[in-house]
Amino acid sequence: MDSAIQQKVDRWLQGNYDQDTKDSIERLQQEDPKELADAFYQNLEFGTGGLRGIMGVGTNRMNKYTVGMATQGYANYLLQSYPGEEVRVAIAHDSRNNSRFFAETTAHVFAANGIKVFLFEALRPTPELSFAIRTLKCQGGVVCTASHNPKEYNGYKAYWNDGGQLVPPHDKNVIKEVEGIASVDDVQWSGGDANITLIGKEIDEQYIEMVKGLSVFPEVIEKQSDLKIVYTPIHGTGITLVPQVLERFGFKNVHIVEEQKTPDGNFPTVAYPNPEEKETMSIGLAKAKELDADILLGTDPDADRVGIGIKNNHGDWVLMNGNQTAVLAFNYLLEARKEKGIARPNDMIITTIVTTGMVDDLAAGYGVHCYRVLTGFKWIAEMIREKEGKEYYITGGEESFGLMIGDKVRDKDAVSAVALLCEMAAYEKNKGKTLFDKLIELYIKFGFYKEKLISITKKGMDGQQQIAAMMQDYRNHLPKTINGIKVVRVLDYQSSKSTDPHTGDVTEIRLPKSNVLQFALEDGSLVSARPSGTEPKIKFYFSVKEKLESADQFDAVDQRLDAKIEGIIADMKLN
């Protein structure tokens, strides 16, 4: 074993770690030295969003000690940022294995540092944590979740006083403090229990009332109260609030997918608890078909992402991708507000650089401002903060199955999204239309945009290096054509430069630096490459478009757009 790794292992075997941890390390030494090396070869990085990793012993794993050290660093920064004030934090967790343990560990470390802690009594959706931070006037917060990752993972997301995840300068400053915690002996583990207050039902009630206030057309729901809804929480936290919210909205015909109803960190019915995956939604799709439902909805374990299924133009059940869901949701809120007479001249919507360009066309069609930010809802939250008092935020969303409706929550919120998407289905049904009819209508009006996402995983110690090499190769050799189509701009968000690869003309990108490359093609297609910040994978986003003249041409144009995307993927040698 590498000597630096062995030194870390020895420090854990000789240091103030519990006996179970030491026994597990010794067992790995005997039975699986490769796994032991992977568990210690690096420190689990506290990135700009917090921690995420596989659970287990070691510096590169999610465990009591990595969580405790991260919390001590975050506590130090909060206390420096608010000298002489009572510092308050809220803490929540999802249904994953060890999530309650990590949440309680976090609470005890904060409390031992003299910080007032509001800890949810049991599992709750991530968006409710964001709401609680704002409602309880906290300076920060933490949710223990790994979102839609496989069951081996857990994570730790850190929030600031606006209920959004950490953004500059706080993200880098917290990272610096966390990196300054050299050992578990630097952590204040206990002694502040009096600083911990359990919260639950009263915050639930305030949150549900807030979501109900987002409804634009309650009178339409009254007419369509028997809209047939199938909902699956995929063994996650959605079960705690989604059924209550739908009932409060007035929906009376809601069917929960029984097999996926119970919170369970082993996610027994799925390989990945991700509503983006057809396999994950297959039980729900079968139930929706059996019941001849109007809409199927599924939320991930921490209920911040939502996937929907609807019947297509042939009557077959299909899952919408995140771009299609965003387009439908954005359009509903803009159209319904206009019809209700509550649209304002300074209304705005926000999306991200890898989300469909159709959102810009929608915004222009309704005369509202559309802002594009880096990927991640913390940037949407930051933009709301920047525009507060000047422009009126309606909704935000991105292609990764996230929506954030209204400004009372500053992170993606699948609970309110489920309610508003059901209201949208009721609104269209009241006009004699399905949601797929509506989608085609929007394609005819604004252009048929089609998107695809592929993820390439590079596992092991050298996975990140392989991904870094791919990105560097693109930067060193700017493509001039892709799939025979001229590349007109290469946008490098790391260097903040947008370059014409033919003339060398450079313009500045005015967004924070991020390791993202985009290739804009002459025909309006866009290809984006973005390494994950939390996993050894790189994501490629493809967006192509064409004019759609009429609904009967949908299938033919759909096939042509598919072929164009596959041609781009083949030319870039990504299949």
Image: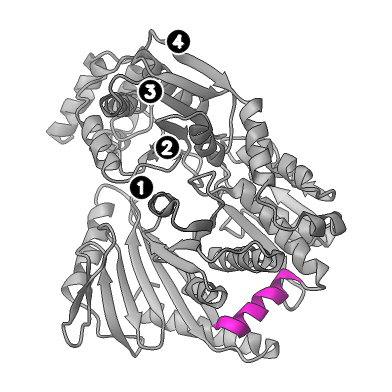
With 186 as the anchor, is 353 left or right in this view? Answer: right
Which residue sits at x=52%, y=48%? 407
Quadrant of the image occupied by residue 276: bottom right
Q: Residues within 10 Å of mark 1 (few under 14, many from 20)?
A: some
Secondary element at tag 2: strand
Look at label 1 and name its amino acid.
Answer: Thr
Q: Residues within 10 Å of mark 2 (few under 14, many from 20)?
A: many
> In the image, is residue 111 above or below residue 365?
above
Quadrant of the image occupied by residue 284: bottom right
Which residue sits at x=39%, y=58%? 375
> In the image, is residue 99 above or below residue 152?
above
Q: For the residues carrying marks 1 and 3, which lies nearer the camera in this image? A: 3
Look at label 4 and name its amino acid.
Answer: Asp
Q: Between marks 2 and 1, how big is the CA–CA gap?
A: 10 Å
Residue toward you, 399 or 566: 399
Evaluate if marks 2 and 1 touch, with contact meaning CB atoms under 8 Å apart: yes
Residue toward you, 163 or 546: 163
* Label ID, residue 534: 1
Q: Position of residue 26 (x, y in %)?
A: 31, 21
Q: For the residues carrying marks 1 and 4, which lies nearer the camera in this image? A: 4
Q: Residues within 10 Å of mark 3 (few under 14, many from 20)?
A: many
Residue 232 is a magenta residue: no
Decide whether the magenta segment is chiefly helix, strand or loop. helix
Q: Which residue is mark 3?
A: 87
